[in-house]
Amino acid sequence: MKRVSCVLLPMLPLQILLREKPHWADAPVAVVDDEGPNGRITHLNLLAKKSRLRIGMRQTVARDLLPNLHTAVVSPERASEVSRELITSLQTFSPRVEAIAHAGAFHIDPEGLRRLYGGYRNWAMSIHRYLQARHWRNSVTVGFHRQRALAVAMTHGGVTILQSADEERERSNETPLGEFDLPGELCESFGALGIETLGDFLALPPGELHSRFGAKASALHDSFAEGMQLPIQPHAFDEPSRISFQVDPPDDNQDRLLFAIKGALHSLLHQVRARGEAVQSLQLSLHLERAPLHQEHIEPASPTLDLMLVLELIRLRLGEASLQGAVEEVEIVANTVRARAEQVALPGHQPSRDMSAAHRALDRIRAAYGEHSVTTAHVREAHLPEASFRFEPIQHARLSDRASVPPLSSMVRRVYSRPKPLPPRKPKEPEAGPTLAKDHAIEHMYGPYRVSGGWWKRLVERDYYYAETDHGDLLWLFYDRPRKRWFLHGVLD
Amino acid sequence: MSAYVPLWVKSNHSFLEGASFPEELVEQAHALGLPAVAITDRDGVYGLVRAHMRAKELGIRIVTGAQLTVDIEGSAHHVVALAKTRRGYADLCRSLSLGHARCEKGVALITPSDLEQARDVFFLCTTPATLRVLHASHGPSSLFALCARHLTDREKPREKGLRSVAKELDVQTVGANEVLYHDKLRRPLQDILACIRGGKVLSEAGHTICANAEHDLKPADELARLFADDPASLRRTLDIAEQCAFSLDDLRYRYPEEHLPSGRSEQGWLRELAFQGARRRYQGKVPADVRTQLEREIQIIRKLDYGGYFLTMY
C-alpha cells in the first residue's frame, strides 16, 4: 500500500508570532484576526488558555479578563510566505510536497526515499529534527491515508510511523473533533449529540449529513472516504539547481579541476534527482584570476542524471578551451526538466554493468597488488556472524545474482572485521546498556538475538541488538556475556 | 497460578534430537512447579510411557502428543498434535502409522488427508502453510498458531507472517518453545546428537546445530518475559492442557473382536450360545437356579469385557 506522510506545525500563526516576538514567550499571547477592539482571537498559547480565554473571543473581552494579554495579527500574506519557506525546506526531504488547507499542515510523499534514509522512521526523524532545530514545533506521521495521517499528527507529537491502515484508522478515530477546522456552533451541535471524536463523526451516515449539518461537515466526512484519496499535488520548485565552490589556491590544471568538479557535480545531480528532475543543460562558470569570466554551456543529447556522461562532456569541452588564468571559483547551474521514472530510479535499480570493463579493472589491480589481491565474499553456513562469510580470491568477476532481483531489504549491514569494544560500564550489565562515544545516546534497542556456541573450542555467548541513536544512526551491537562487555559489530545504512 | 504448560517437548526418544530422558523432563517440570508437561516426540509417542510412569509418581499431568511431519506440496512442515481424548489419541496414532507405513524406517511423512478424520486433537501449527491446510479441513476451533521464541533473528519475521495468517483465518496463537533438553547443560550433547544426525563434525556444523542454548525447559517467569508482549498466548497453554484430558491410564487391553453373525452384538451372541448349550444339557428344561447362575456369570463377563475371549475359546 502506498505511503503518505503528514508534517504538522500546530498553530502555525502563533508559532510565527512567537518567533518574531521571542520576548513574549513567557506571557499570555493571542493571535487575532484584526487589530481593532472587535478583532477575534484565532490562536492562543497555553498561558492564555489557562486564564479562561477562548478562541473566537473578542479582543476587548479578552483584555478585560486578562489585561497583560499580548495580541497581534499574523497576516495571511505572512503565513503564506512562511508556508512557502517551509515547503522549500521540506523539498530537501522529498520532491513531492503539498501544503494543504489546514494551517501548518503539509503532505509529503515518502515513497522512494526510504532506501536513502534507511527506513521511514529515519526519514521522518530527519524532518522532525530539522524543523525542531529551527525552533518549529512539529509532528511527523507516516501513514496510508492523507486525512487520517493528518488526524494522527494532530494528537501525536514527534514521529509516528503507522504500521497498518487498521492502526491508522484506530488512532485517527480518537482525534477530538474540535481539532478540525469546523465552525464553533457546529462543534457544539455535535457535542450535544455526544459526538466528540473523529471516530464518532465518521460513524454517522453520510447521506443526511449535508442536509442536517451543512456542507462543511459533509465535506469533512467525504474527505475521509477510503476511495476519495487524491494523489499529492506537489509544489513546483522555484530555484534552478546550482552549486559553486572556491578553488584555493587558484588552479589551471584541468585534471585537478575536473576532479573537483566531479565532487560538486555529484552533489548537484543528487539535488536534481531528489526533485524528480533530470539535467537538460549545464551552465559552467569559471571565475578566473585576473581574467574575465569563462563560461561554457553543456547540453547532453537528452536529459540525464548520469554523472560520468556529464563529466565526460565537461572534460571534452575544457580540453578544447584555453583558459586565460587560474580558476579561483567554479559555479555550475543546472537547467532541469521533469525526469522519466527510470531516470530517478534509486541505486539497486540501475542498468546492468559493463563486465568486460570490470575484468580489465580487476586485471590491473591484480597486476599491481598480486594474484590474491582480488577477493569475493563466500557465504558459509554458520551462526556466528564473522564465520558466516569468507573472502576468497577470484579470477573472474561475476555479476551478482542480486542484480537481477529486487533487494529484499534496503538496509545494508556493514560488519566490522573486528568488533569494536565500547567503553566499559559499572556492574549490572547488560541491564545498564551500552555506552557510546561522547554526544551519542541510544534511543531504542531492538533484540536481543542470542548466538552461543563453540563450546568445543572457545565458548561464545553474545546477545545482539539493533540500536537507534539520537542522531538517527542504526548500530549493530552485542553484549559479550563471558567477557561482560559491549561491542559494536557493525552499522546499518 | 502457574503461567504456562510446555506444549512442544521432545525427549531422547526423538532419536538424535532430544537430549534428555522423558523422566528428566518430567522431573524438571515438576521442580519448576509446572502443572503439566506435554511429551511430543518426533513422529511418534515413544517417550510417553516412561514420562507417564514418572509423572504418576510425582503427581504431575502429562499432555499426550507428537510432533508430526506433514507433507504440503512436497515440503515438510512441523505440526504439534495433542490428543484431547482417547479417541484423539487413537486418531493421532492412526495418522502416525499411516505416515510410517509409506516411509523408510525412522521417518513418517503424513499427508493432510491422513489428518482429515482426526477428531479430538489440537493442532499447533508452526507455519502459515499448515495453518491454511488444516484450517480448510478442521476449521479454527482445533487449530492454534504456534509462536516459538528462542531469541534467534529469523524468528521475528517468521512469527509476524504466522500471526498475520492466523488473524486472517481467525485462529488463536499459542506460545511454546521447542524443548530439546531439560537443562542448558545438555546443550553440548544436543549439538553432538544433531551433528551425528546431520553427518557433520562440530567445527563444520553450521545450521545443523541450534544457534543458542534456548531449547531448555524454562521456568514460568523466564517464558513470561519472552512473551511479555503477548501473555494471552502463554495463558492459552493452560487452557489447552486442561482440555487435553487423555491419560495413558485410560488405555487398557482390548481383546480383538470376534466375527459375529450379522446383527448380533458380542454379548448377545455369547448369551444366545450359552443358553443354547444349557438347553441341550438339560434337554430343553433349564432349571431356574442354573438359569440364574448363567445370567450372573454372563453379567460378570460383560462387566469385564471378556465376551470376545469366551467366544474364541468355547
Image (tube, coloured by chain):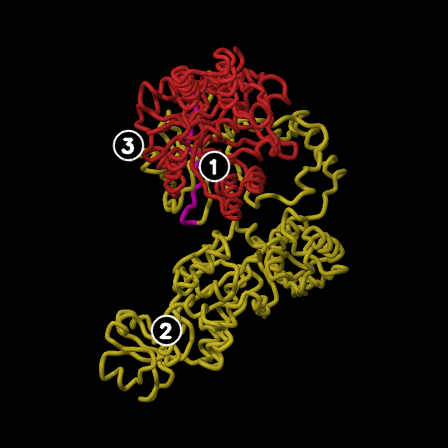
Chain colours: A yellow, B red
Visible residue check, residue A189: yes
Tell me which amino acid carries mark 1. Leu
Name the dominant secondary structure of the magenta segment.
Answer: strand
Residue at the spot 54% in from the left edge and 65% down from the top edge: A226
In the image: residue A87, left or right of residue A158: right
Position of residue A236 relative to residue B239, above or below, is: below
Note whether A422 is above or below B303 in the view shown. Answer: below
What chain does mark 1 sit on?
A: B
Cα distance in 3D space between marks 3 and 1: 37 Å
For the residues carrying marks 1 and 2, which lies nearer the camera in this image?
A: 1
x and y, in percent, of residue A254 in the image: 68, 51
Image coords of residue A145 (percent x, y): 52, 62
Residue that badge 2 annotates:
A14
Q: How many other residues sit within 10 Å of disc 1, few (<14), some (14-19) or many (≥20)? A: many
Considering the numbered disc 2 on the image, is that residue within a helix, a strand or a loop?
helix
Reading the chain from its start, which is encountered first: label 2 or label 3? 2
